[in-house]
């Protein structure tokens, strides 16, 4: 290990020789490993990113930090203790072994590296710096194999002690569709984080921006129409591990259909110690039907059960619940369940079925409690920072209106001729601001005006949720004192 190691070249050489003579796990048959890897594939080309998150969770990292450029993405694992940094010998031994499906952090890490090169066909350079000696880069793939040894020792590949992994994702040519999806700063990498790693219990930063958190993921599709109503969880489960690892920002909350999106992201000290969690959201219809109940509409499946392991979504299953507007997302801890070699598909056995049944039943129990039935989803939901929310909304609306008014060159010129002393920008800003204020004054919130109709639809959906959740499995007796989320009343 005196020199840098090209894993790809080393594997090829040793496959020709048949075996490597060494000690312990380092003694492997590369032909056997190659045959095993040929049958192995992660469920997505980008799933190696999720495996890196699982690795960071298993190492108990303080955070996982990504720094992106057009060509490269650097993953920095902020380990709590430099003694956790594996040696080059340990990494190489694991990489060269035929072991697949191991549960340790190093097993997941090396599996991610092999998938990165073998399945996604990218190139990486890895520096494990424990602080006690000069680290030796480990690399694989065409790009980092083609640069010089001196270039591989560039400080950007190891900005500080710890574990630094740099992935090259710029296409070799524009027509190269093998890596084109990773062009422009690794968009697919951040997409994987957004879709599958939003429940990571450790903070994930991309260029300094936090990307973990239940309410910020695009998977749940929150928008002006789709709004969260409740975030909570269940405890005292028998068939699930105690204490589901959750993002630092997670807490039990109840919302209103009138809650400002900025308010939904603020913390209020709600409970966060759950064995499984769930989220209830509501999609405001484009228009309410003339018939009060809207019984002529056909309910659709909108609810899901999500299995999470080490902060990563490994499976999502549709629930057989049909609703008009509501969607229920139930998040279950998949730790300890049997899986295939990838770790991304659980085995449908008695243990998993018992855990699913218990979690679904206990969520149903929570939704049947009186404290939930009494929630007013139309209440005015304000706190001390709500005036700042209104100002920010006003500025956003004015900016959007300015973009509309400035489309085409004629508007600015005409306004300048009409009011030359004020000037185009000021005039447009005044008109946009006045338009926003007039619009707000003229229309009372349509969801308050049609509150009675929406209340009936909400009650109908809740009834369907409760009925199906209870009948899906045996409804066990819940905890003696029903859990209650944090209600946003007054300045709480």
Image (cartoon, grey):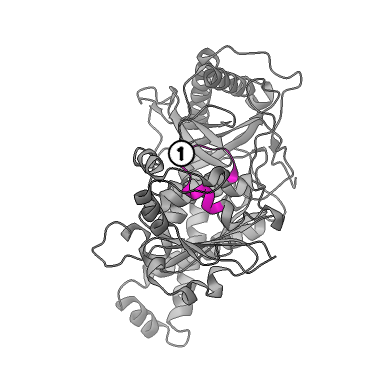
- Magenta span of residues: 91-105
User: Between 18 and 177, which is closer to the camera in this rendering?
Assistant: 18
Question: Residue 119 appears at what percent x and percent y?
Answer: 36, 49
Q: To which residue does mark 1 refer? A: 284
Q: Residues within 10 Å of mark 1 (few under 14, many from 20)?
A: some
* Position of residue 408 in the picture relative to residue 151 (left or right): left
Residue 192 visible in the snapshot: no
Image quarter for residue 318? top left
Residue at position x 58%, y 68% from top?
158
Question: Vertically, is 366 above or below 76?
Answer: above
SS state under label 1: loop
Image quarter for residue 211? bottom right
Question: Residue 482 appears at what percent x and percent y?
Answer: 72, 23
Q: Quadrant of the C terminus?
A: top right
Question: Residue 355 appears at what percent x and percent y?
Answer: 57, 21
Q: Quadrant of the N terminus?
A: bottom right
Image quarter for residue 184? bottom left
Residue 28 visible in the snapshot: yes
Q: How many marks?
A: 1
Question: Vertically, is 263 above or below 208?
Answer: above
Question: Residue 396 appears at what percent x and percent y?
Answer: 51, 63
Question: Does the stretch in magenta take in 301?
Answer: no
User: Between 142 and 208, which is closer to the camera in this rendering?
Assistant: 142
Residue at position x 38%, y 42% from top?
37
User: Between 16 and 157, which is closer to the camera in this rendering?
Assistant: 16
Residue at position x 37%, y 70% from top?
146
Q: Residue furthest left?
A: 175
């Amino acid at each position: 290990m005196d020199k840098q190691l090209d894993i790809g070249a080393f594997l090829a050489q040793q496959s020709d020789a048949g075996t490597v003579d060494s000690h312990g796990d380092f003694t492997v048959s590369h032909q056997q490993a190659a045959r095993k890897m040929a049958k192995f594939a992660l469920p997505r080309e980008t799933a190696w990113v999720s495996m890196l998150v699982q690795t960071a969770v298993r190492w108990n990292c303080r955070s996982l930090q990504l720094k992106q450029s057009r060509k490269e993405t650097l993953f920095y694992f902020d380990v709590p203790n430099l003694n956790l940094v594996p040696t080059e010998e340990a990494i190489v031994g694991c990489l060269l072994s035929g072991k697949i499906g191991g549960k340790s952090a190093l097993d997941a890490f090396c599996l991610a590296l092999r998938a990165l090169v073998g399945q996604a066909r990218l190139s990486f350079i890895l520096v494990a710096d424990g602080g006690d000696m000069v680290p030796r880069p480990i690399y694989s793939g065409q790009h980092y194999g083609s640069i010089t040894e001196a270039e591989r020792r560039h400080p950007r590949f190891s900005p500080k002690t710890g574990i630094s992994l740099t992935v090259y994702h710029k296409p070799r040519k524009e027509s190269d569709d093998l890596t084109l999806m990773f062009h422009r700063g690794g968009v697919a990498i951040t997409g994987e984080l957004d879709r599958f790693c939003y429940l990571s219990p450790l903070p994930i930063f991309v260029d300094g921006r936090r990307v973990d958190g239940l309410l910020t993921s695009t998977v749940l599709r929150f928008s002006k129409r789709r709004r969260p109503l409740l975030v909570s969880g269940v405890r005292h489960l028998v068939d699930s591990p105690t204490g589901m690892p959750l993002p630092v920002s997670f807490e039990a909350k109840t919302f209103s259909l009138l809650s400002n999106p900025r308010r939904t992201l603020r913390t209020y000290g709600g409970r966060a110690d759950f064995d499984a969690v769930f989220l209830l959201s509501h999609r405001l219809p484009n228009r309410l039907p003339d018939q009060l109940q809207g019984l002529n509409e056909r309910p659709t499946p909108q609810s899901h059960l999500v299995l999470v392991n080490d902060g990563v979504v490994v499976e999502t299953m549709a629930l057989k619940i049909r609703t008009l507007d509501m969607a229920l997302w139930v998040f279950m801890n998949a730790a300890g369940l049997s899986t295939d070699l990838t770790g991304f598909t659980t085995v449908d056995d008695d243990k998993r079925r018992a855990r699913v049944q218990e979690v679904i039943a206990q969520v149903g129990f929570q939704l049947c409690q009186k404290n939930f039935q009494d929630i007013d989803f139309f209440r005015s939901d304000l706190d001390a920072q709500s005036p700042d929310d209104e100002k920010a909304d006003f500025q956003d609306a004015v900016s959007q209106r300015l973009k509309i008014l400035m489309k085409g060159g004629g508007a600015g010129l005409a306004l300048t001729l009409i009011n030359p002393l004020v000037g185009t920008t000021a005039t447009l800003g005044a008109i946009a601001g006045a338009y926003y204020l007039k619009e707000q004054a003229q229309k009372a919130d349509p969801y308050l005006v049609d509150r009675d109709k929406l209340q009936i639809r909400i009650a109908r959906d809740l009834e369907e949720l409760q009925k199906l959740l209870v009948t899906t499995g045996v409804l066990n007796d819940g905890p003696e004192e029903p859990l209650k989320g944090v209600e946003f009343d007054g300045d709480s």
